[in-house]
Image (cartoon, grey):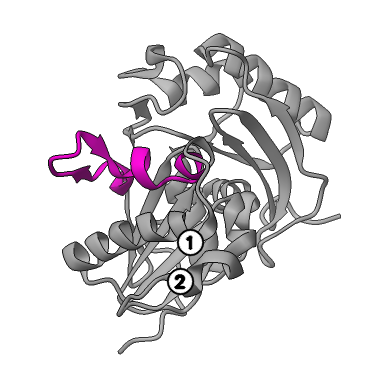
């Protein structure tokens, strides 16, 4: 049987679905089925907690000794959620970590969903060993972001909310995958919007690597080659499992420095 130090449970809470699985922390792979339930309508705290319990019960780990990490779509600081992306406004300035720990009867590690996806890609994916500044973006209902410098996570970057001057919309309203679906754009038309977004982020931060995550990353061959950037841009390896893997990877209370294998310049 694998040690509880080499396996952990990750839960990824999103606006439409709540996913979970058991993760091998040495390989960065799921060693169980990925369990998914729908996010309850309105996504209020008590209902989300019930859904998380359902995922843990289905995985048969509710009473296990595995460490548990939980990813959530909000700014997370000192265990409190300071925003609410596609969930109830009741999460704003809410003691979420304590709420989950008391409701589940166990300690957890609680973090922003895009940040943990970044952790997964740095430890086990497209950004492993990358030096300098890596910016991961998740393209979905919104645009999540993670900034990692020489293996150290800079949390809660929220680069999906960069404002488009004179347009009255932020970046994710204009360029998220949901905008492509909403406005019935083809890949070329959507790539034109992404070109604006990534060029703007590139100008502001001069990153060394972009990693594109979210479910749409499986279609990277449809749009990444259409972007003209100075910065290398790669699809995420773990796609929609990145939140589960990253949450599990942080569940043992790891230090902010994520990867000892960073290649220095």
| Element type at mark 2 | helix
48 is higher (above) or lower (below) than 151: above
Image spot of residue 89 (x, y percent)? 38, 14
Distance from disc 2 to disc 1, alpha carbons, whole Å, reads: 7 Å
* Residue at the extreme right: 1
* Residue at the extreme bottom: 265
Q: Which quadrant holds the N terminus?
A: bottom right
Image spot of residue 133 (x, y percent)? 30, 70
Give the side of residue 259 with respect to residue 68, left or right. Answer: left
Read off the magenta span: 156-180
Q: Which residue is denoted by mark 1 in the rendering? A: 188
Report whether residue 245 is seen. no
Q: Quadrant of residue 37?
A: top right
Give the side of residue 222 with respect to residue 137, left or right. Answer: right
189 is higher (above) or lower (below) than 45: below
- Residue sitting at x 36%, y 54%: 193
- Residue sitting at x 81%, y 35%: 59
Residue 226 numbered mark, or none: 2
Could you tell me if the residues under marks 2 and 1 are in contact, i.e. CB atoms within 8 Å? yes
47 is higher (above) or lower (below) than 244: above
Residue 172 numbered mark, or none: none
Q: Nearer the viewer, mark 2 or mark 1?
A: 1
Give the side of residue 227 with respect to residue 235, left or right. Answer: left
- Residue sitting at x 48%, y 49%: 139
């Amino acid at each position: 049987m694998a040690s509880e130090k080499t396996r952990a449970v990750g839960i990824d809470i999103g606006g439409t679905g709540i996913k979970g699985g058991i993760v091998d922390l040495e390989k960065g792979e799921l060693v169980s089925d990925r369990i998914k339930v729908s996010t309850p309508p309105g996504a209020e705290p008590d209902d989300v907690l019930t859904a998380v319990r359902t995922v843990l019960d289905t995985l048969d780990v509710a009473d296990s000794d595995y460490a548990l990490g939980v990813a959530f779509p909000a700014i997370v600081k000192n265990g409190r959620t300071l925003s609410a992306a596609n969930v109830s406004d009741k999460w704003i300035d809410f003691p979420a970590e304590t709420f989950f720990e008391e409701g589940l009867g166990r300690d957890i590690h609680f973090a922003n969903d895009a940040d943990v996806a970044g952790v997964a890609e740095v430890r086990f994916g497209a950004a492993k060993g990358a030096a300098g500044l890596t910016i991961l973006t998740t393209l979905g209902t919104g645009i999540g972001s993670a900034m990692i410098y020489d293996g150290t996570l800079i949390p809660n970057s929220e680069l999906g909310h960069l404002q488009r001057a004179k347009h009255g919309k932020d970046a994710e309203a204009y360029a998220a995958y949901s905008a492509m679906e909403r406005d019935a754009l083809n890949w070329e038309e959507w790539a034109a919007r992404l070109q604006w977004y990534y060029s703007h982020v590139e100008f502001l931060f001069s990153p060394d690597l972009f990693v594109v995550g979210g479910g749409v990353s499986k279609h990277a061959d449809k749009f990444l080659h259409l972007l003209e950037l100075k910065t290398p841009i790669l699809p995420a390896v773990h796609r929609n499992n990145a939140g589960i893997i990253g949450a599990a990877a942080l569940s043992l209370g790891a230090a902010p420095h994520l990867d000892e294998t960073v290649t220095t310049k």
